[in-house]
Structure formats: structure tokens, C-alpha cells
Amino acid sequence: MDELDQRLVFTLRQNARLSVAGLAHKLQVSRRTITHRLRKLEGTQVIVGYTVRLRPDAEPGRTPAWMGVQVEGRQTRSVMASLLGEPGVWPRCTTRTGAAIGWPSGTWAR
């Protein structure tokens, strides 16, 4: 996945119900580009389905925890892109140096 694919997956994780036009507008590319990328990601089974996120109290079996990730040098963008390319990782809040991200199990990374 290149950077655009990662941004597309990240955006779909925030709202998988966005239309192709909405995705194109948000990512500042053409609708044709979004359609092509979605077909490619679905065809190669990078995207295997779409899902829903629930409020934390709707799943009482999960235990939230915070986890920090320290990045050396100028690798923050690369590390964030890699983590955001993982299933179930999504941004949680903004920090001084970037967005905090979370894992589906209820553990969060900053």
C-alpha cells in the first residue's frame, strides 16, 4: 500500500459509509482514483469487508489501556502510516507531535 492507499484506509476507518465522492473530496483526488483504489484494495483482499464501531460501554468485556510509542529521528510519518495501515487502528486525539492512534482490542497508542 502506498501513502494514498493508507490515507484511504484510514479515512474509511473513521467513516466507512462515506461515498466515493466524499472520499475523493476528503483525500483531494478524483472519484475515478478512489474507485480504482477501492477495487484494487478489495480485489487483493487488503480490504475484506466493512464494519461498525461501537461505544466502549457497548462492549463491557474490553479493558482500555494506553500505550506510548516513541519514534527516533524523523520516522514519525512513516511509523504512523504503517500503524494506520493495520486493521482496527484509528486516530483517537491530537497530540503536540501528531495524532494518537488506537487498536481494536481497546488498547490505545499515542
Image (cartoon, rainbow, N blue to C red):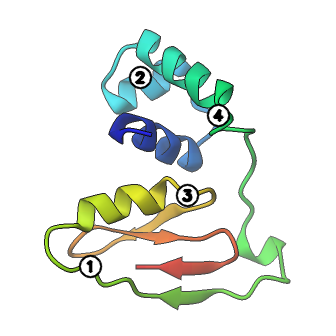
N-term-proximal mark, 3 vs 2: 2
| Tag of residue 86 | 3
For label 4, count other residues whose C-alpha is less than 10 Å away and answer few (under 14), some (14-19) or many (20+).
Answer: few
N-term-proximal mark, 1 vs 4: 4
Front residue of this view, candidates 41 and 30 = 41
Front residue of this view, candidates 83 and 60 = 83
| Tag of residue 24 | 2
User: Mark 1–mark 4 contact, CB under 8 Å?
Assistant: no
User: Mark 4–mark 3 contact, CB under 8 Å?
Assistant: no
Task: Judge from the rendering whether residue 44 lies leftward or rightward of residue 11; answer left or right.
Answer: right
Vertical comparison of 58 with 7: above or below: below
Instruction: Work out how far the residue at label 4 is from the one at label 3, CA to CA, in angstroms.
Output: 19 Å
Callout 1, which amino acid?
Val
Question: Residue lying farthest left?
Answer: 73
Which residue, given by chain and number where applicable, does mark 4 sit on? 17
- Percent across and percent down for residue 107 are 61, 81
**Quadrant of the snapshot with the C terminus:** bottom left
N-term-proximal mark, 4 vs 3: 4
Quadrant of res 12: top right
Q: Residue at x 75, y 38 (%)?
A: 49
| Tag of residue 71 | 1
Q: Residue at x 55, y 58 (%)?
A: 86
Task: Judge from the rendering whether residue 34 lies leftward or rightward of residue 86; answer left or right.
Answer: left
For label 1, count other residues whose C-alpha is less than 10 Å away and answer few (under 14), some (14-19) or many (20+).
Answer: few
Residue depth check, mark 4 versus mark 3: number of the one nearer the observer: 3
N-term-proximal mark, 4 vs 2: 4
